Image (tube, rainbow, N blue to C red):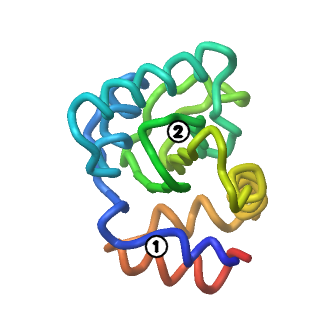
Amino acid sequence: MKLRDLFTADVVNLNLTAESKDDTVKQLVALLQLDDKSNGILYKTLKRRENLGSTGIGHGIAIPHCRSLVVSRLRLAYGRRPGGVEFKAIDDEPVFNFFLIVAPPLEVSNQYLPVLGKIAQFAKDEDVPGLLAGLEDPEDFLKLLEERAT
């Protein structure tokens, strides 16, 4: 399975407006279009995960992720924050690109960790941050995944 197959244009926001790490996570969760209670639970779960250690992997990219009962299948979203957000990334640089991954605790397809690995591998490509910065609409993001991600 390719990363492109896991994203749709409605879970891509190229203009996040959050000024803080917490608000960024809230905006990413909102992309999944869950109910208010589920949004709150998911936000708290992701915040607990971030307290264990930042998911900011460097080069302006973070991959917040968790398992939660609020989803019945693997869900992904992508957000970009022009200007960046302080996210306590491993390189102490601002984060501009956020790949959200949420999976149920018991996942039959067992895609959670492989997808996390695929996104990390995609993000390691030195061209990717610049390519993500140049995106103009969600379809461009999907096309980039089609061309560059496995």
Could you tell me which secondary element the residue under label 1 belongs to?
Answer: helix
| Residue 93 in picture, x, y percent from top left | 60, 31
The quadrant the N terminus occupies is bottom right
Residue at point 41% right, 52% down? 80
Residue 96 picture location, percent across and down = 48, 45
Q: Nearer the viewer, residue 3 or 108?
A: 108
- What percent of the width, then of the height, locates residue 14? 34, 59
Q: Which residue is mark 2?
A: 95
* Quadrant location, the C terminus: bottom right
Question: Residue at the spot x=37%, y=33% of the render?
Answer: 24
Percent position (x, y) of residue 85? 43, 32
Choose between 48 and 17: the one closer to the eye: 48
Q: Are marks 2 and 1 in contact (CB under 8 Å)?
A: no
Give the class, few, some or many, for how many residues have Cα within 10 Å of label 1's Cα (few <14, many ≥20).
Answer: many
Residue in front for this viewpoint, 116 or 135 = 116
Amino acid beneath label 1 = Phe
Q: Which mark is residue 141?
A: 1
Crowd rating for badge 2 (residues with CA inside 10 Å; few <14, some 14–19, many 20+): many
| Rendered image quadrant of residue 92 | top right
Is 52 displayed left or right of 18 in the figure? right
Q: Is residue 102 left or right of residue 114?
A: left
Amino acid beneath label 2: Val
Rendered position, 144 above or below 65: below
